[in-house]
Amino acid sequence: MNGNLRLPIEFLETLPNVNGQDVDIQLKEALSNLDKKIIVLDDDPTGVQTVHGVSVFTDWTVESIEHGFNEKEPMFFILTNSRGFTAEETEKAHQEIAKNILSVSTKLNQDFIIISRGDSTLRGHYPLETNVLKETIESNSEMKMDGEVILPFFKEGGRLTINNIHYVQYGQELVPAGETEFAKDRTFGYSKSNLGEWIEEKSNGEYTAENTLYISLEQLRSLNIEEIAEQLVQVKDFNKVVVNAVDEADVKIFTIALVQAMNQGKNFLFRSAAALPKVIGGVTDKALLTRKELVREETGNGGLIIIGSHVKKTTEQLEELKKLSDVEFIELNTHLVLYPEQFQKECDRVIEMAESLIRSGRTVAVYTSRKRLDLGENKKEEELKLSVTISNAVTSIVTRLQVKPNFLIAKGGITSSDVGTKGLKVKRATVAGQIRPGIPVWTLGDESKYPDMAYVIFPGNVGTKTDLKEVTQILSNQQK
């Protein structure tokens, strides 16, 4: 297994094609036989980047979960924001979620499946989240989890799985995920790109690459649906299933086989990126959203862009955004977080400036210092706690704002989650669709600070270099 094999993007042209129309017909039939509510637990708000017309709940109370079960749509999302949690907080949240889902499922006599939607570059609390879900479900019900499906494919972000190796697209090259900046994440880092080896690495050898079931592109493209379904039926002891995919068609073919296996009584948990929820939820394609659909009320005020993510892609996009002369930029000096009094004054300064500029009709971009805080070795938990303090400060910009911006963009998963739940006080939003590929928009509920406003959730690691600038131009009505 060569984990260091880079591939040119042209490699994808060598793969056999499938008849998409036939696959769609079979998928529609399979989904009509899937009588289970699909619940997607999203560890940040970017997991809705492929769907539209579905609800997102920002808490996991029995009331919210029951609301989701009772909706006519087959799927709903619960935003856990667990990528910003400590391990202990993550465990507690997932125990509560699993118990509440079981309670509602029993009350309504409705089966369910749970998808743990994680980052397509393999960061997050894995395998903790799905292990806790499995243990809680099994100890509080008769249900047994036979296996776990690992499917991090996300085409819009250039995340493809080929020969069991997960790749990230950089320009015209596919780079193994373990060689990217994402693998060096201080909290969720890893070294393996082969997903079987990655599972073994993350589970400390509890689940091995050797015992993993691999669903290959060759199987999928040959439409060996019965064979794949039979392999899934044989999975037991919560062993892992790695699905290769380079196109949505691959996920569709797998899903047809998966439904067959589930209809034979097999139970799976899922750790996936955003492609699987769209497919298994039967969500149709939708054109990118226009300004007319997004800005429903012209306030005369400027817009607000909040940039918290530190990944290289975000910083590049910020540099492009700075080329717009009609946007004002305010840096929040996050290194002052080590000095609480000074940090408070810094937050006050930023909020006053932003308020004044937005009121005058100027669009404002507030961004955190680009150099990350580094406390040294073995300080992951301390750094995570400081990052929460910084995130709270960023959120307070929205909480304390006395003026309604004409639009709001938040850049970065944890940033957009905190701004949505704490700053905008969203309890339930509807996914309107996407403004650019992989960049979702929420329509805010009546309970929020700005009812009916379009809120753009811009993932840190998604988009071209110019996408942030172009989204801002669309919303500012400054398109060239």
Image (tube, helix red, strand yellow):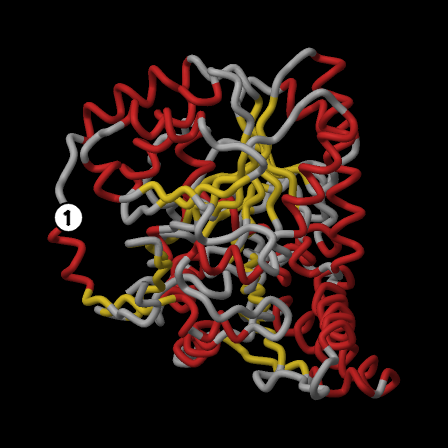
Q: Quadrant of the N terminus?
A: bottom left
Q: Is residue 249 above or below residue 36?
A: below
| 383 or 344, nearer to the observer | 383
Counting from the top left corner in percent of width and height, residue 153 is at: 38, 50
Counting from the top left corner in percent of width and height, residue 142 is at: 71, 20
Q: Residue at x 19, y 23 (%)?
A: 22
Callout 1 amino acid: Leu
Quadrant of the rendered image containing residue 419: bottom right
Q: Residue at x 37, y 18 (%)?
A: 30
Q: Residue at x 55, y 71 (%)?
A: 362
| 69 or 241, nearer to the observer | 241
Counting from the top left corner in percent of width and height, residue 319 is at: 43, 81
Q: Residue at x 63, y 61 (%)?
A: 414
Q: Is residue 351 visible?
A: no
Q: Say which element carries label 1.
A: loop
Residue that badge 1 annotates: 15
Q: Is residue 438 above or below residue 360?
A: above
Q: Quadrant of the C terminus?
A: bottom left
Left or right: where does residue 422 sit relative to residue 212?
Answer: right
Q: Residues within 10 Å of mark 1 (few under 14, many from 20)?
A: few
Counting from the top left corner in percent of width and height, residue 288 is at: 35, 45
Q: Is residue 39 above or below residue 272?
A: above
| 120 or 363, nearer to the observer | 120
